Image (spheres, rainbow, N blue to C red):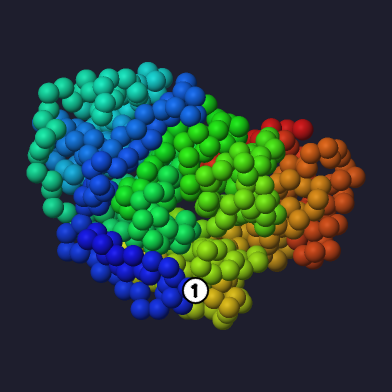
Amino acid sequence: MTGPWTGYELPASPTGYGDLRDGFEWQIPDRYNIADHALSGDGDAVALRHVAAEDEPYTGTTMTYGELAAATRALAARLADGGIAAGDRVAVCLPQCPELVVAHLAVYRLGGVVVPVSMLLGEHSFGYVLDHSDASALVVDSERWNAAGDVRTAAPTETVPVDVGSGTAPLGGLTEFVGDAPSSTGPPAVETRPDDPALVLYTSGTTSDPKGVVQGHQYLLGSLPGYHCWFDLFDPTAARRARVWTPSEWAWAGALFDVVFPTLALGGTVVSSLRRAGFDPERALDVVAGQGVTHAFLPPTALRAIRRETDPAPDDVPTLETMLCGGEHLPDDLAAWATDRLAVTVNEAYGQTEANALAGESNGVYPAAPDGLGRPYPGHEIVVVDEDGAPVPTGEGGEIAVVRPDPVVMQEYVDDPAATAAVLDDDLLRTGDIGRFDDGVLTHLGRADDLVLTAGYRVSPLEVESALEAHPAVSAALVRGEPDPERGQRVVATVVPSPDVTPDDDLASVLKESVAESLGPHKRPRDIDFVSSLPTTRTDKADRSGHGGGDRD
């Protein structure tokens, strides 16, 4: 697949992994801007389909590429009138909605830098991101802003409250702010280089203040090979007809650069679904069916909720073809359940804010490997190294690292040179994740700081979770280490029992022995706590901090 913006070539009908990787070469242009690429689709084609919170899933509104481009130009003109220029940072705190996409593209068009802000941040974290990023402007959901408390006094002078869904098309809730700003031309688009800063993406910060990850415009370009692979969208016509959706909040790298902007860059349709409450599995299935979603990105936590709270059949999601799962470990039994009950191809992928879309599966092209998460995607070279940065032998564990240069590798952490230097080590980006290669397949063993060091042994939480989830009495499991005066740390598990299973001390004993028999007695959980749902972080990843709570049984 090639074109004026792609910056690489991939076969439209690859016949295997070698067909994807052999001869792949980045062809990154001298000038590149996310907005130009995302708005390059057919002006009459539908770019966005939106379902408001109160809408029936089979209704909603649409926006063409031409309308999206006009709205982008109009907002860019208004922001420029307010003093926003190349290099300025603009925070965007909005739910899933067309206004969010317009805000991003308008800032990119001006050569500015978008700072995505989660709607779920508490007052301290919200204020921290605004202050730490030195944002010149804030585009924010009106409801969220009304509840922002003391953050309002420290916000940028140019604060734009958006009543999502109000106003007139195509600007919606931005109509009043834009006013009479011209949409026909707007200010000339700023020519940017691929590595000019475009984003400051804040990490989830579950144990400390989040870090601001600076990424260039080429972050989109570098994410596209993975998108082709995990959604099996190599043919340009198939990519343009795709309708792609995720329930994940559009404030994180996964949703924005695994779904939203790659879909627009390839001329497809992004489906957005506004919600003001937690994830609703029934409504999720209704949105997929009602909007004709063909490709979806669901974190395993969301897929577990669908399995636990619904009883789906393929006819419930007749248009769905392929599902991406990422952000946390995808158990084999959960993938098999989705393949069977939803009749979809399920692909797991691996990446992080600092380096997106690195490796994973593409079951339409090459077979999945049991227990592994897949192979490096085209354009990305991954190595597993020891503490000194030297490659470890095949089959041995070490730190996953990305060879630089690579268009998805971050530039720096904002105002944190020490942390930047620790991650950008010579010609490597050190991910902080532990893994190993077996016959070219990458297995993710967890975060380096998640490993449980118990009685001199290094225990991977993911390995113990997989062993627990292989037991028929277990629906889901989460494993972490807790301080222990004798062992240094002890292995502790939080378990969601399968339906109709009674959680009690006898079950806990059975599960402990099952892990000991499967993995060895040193990996046996010393304590097992039963809950009805697992604790998660703001990004819907498993929360191993021990502070997430969960719902107790």
Q: Is residue 428 visible?
A: no
State the image quarter where residue 457 is shown: bottom right
Report the side of 530 relative to 279 (left or right): right
Query: Is residue 35 left or right of 92 when viewed as pictured?
Result: left
Instruction: Give the residue at x 52% y 38%.
Output: 288
Instruction: Please report the residue visible at 39 percent of the width from the left and 32 percent of the height from the top.
Output: 50
Question: Where on the picture, by quarter, is residue 196?
Answer: bottom left
| Quadrant into which the N terminus falls | bottom left
* Front position in the image: 39 or 501: 39
Residue 9 to residue 293: above or below: below
Q: How many marks?
A: 1
Residue 209 screen position, x and y as percent: 43, 42
Spot occupied by residue 535 in the image (x, y as percentages of width and height): 63, 39
Q: Position of residue 132 (x, y in %)?
A: 32, 40
| Rendered view: 169 above or below 344 | above
For image coordinates 48% across by 47% down, the residue present is: 294
Residue farthest along the bottom direction in this orientation: 393
**Which residue is at the front of the view, 518 or 460?**
518
**Label 1 environment density (alpha carbons within 10 Å; few <14, some 14–19, many ≥20):** some
Return the residue nearer the eye: 218 or 24: 24
For the C terminus, which image quadrant? top right
Q: Which amino acid type corresponds to the residue marked 1 in the rendered image?
A: Gly
Q: Is residue 39 visible?
A: yes
- Residue that badge 1 annotates: 16
Measured as percent of width and height from the top left, residue 375 is found at 51, 69
Question: What residue appears at the point 41 percent right and 28 percent down from the top-left corner?
Answer: 60
Q: Examine the rendered structure and indicate whether residue 400 appears above or below residue 264.
A: below
Callout 1: helix, strand or loop? loop
Along the line of sight, the residue nearer the viewer: 25 or 236: 236
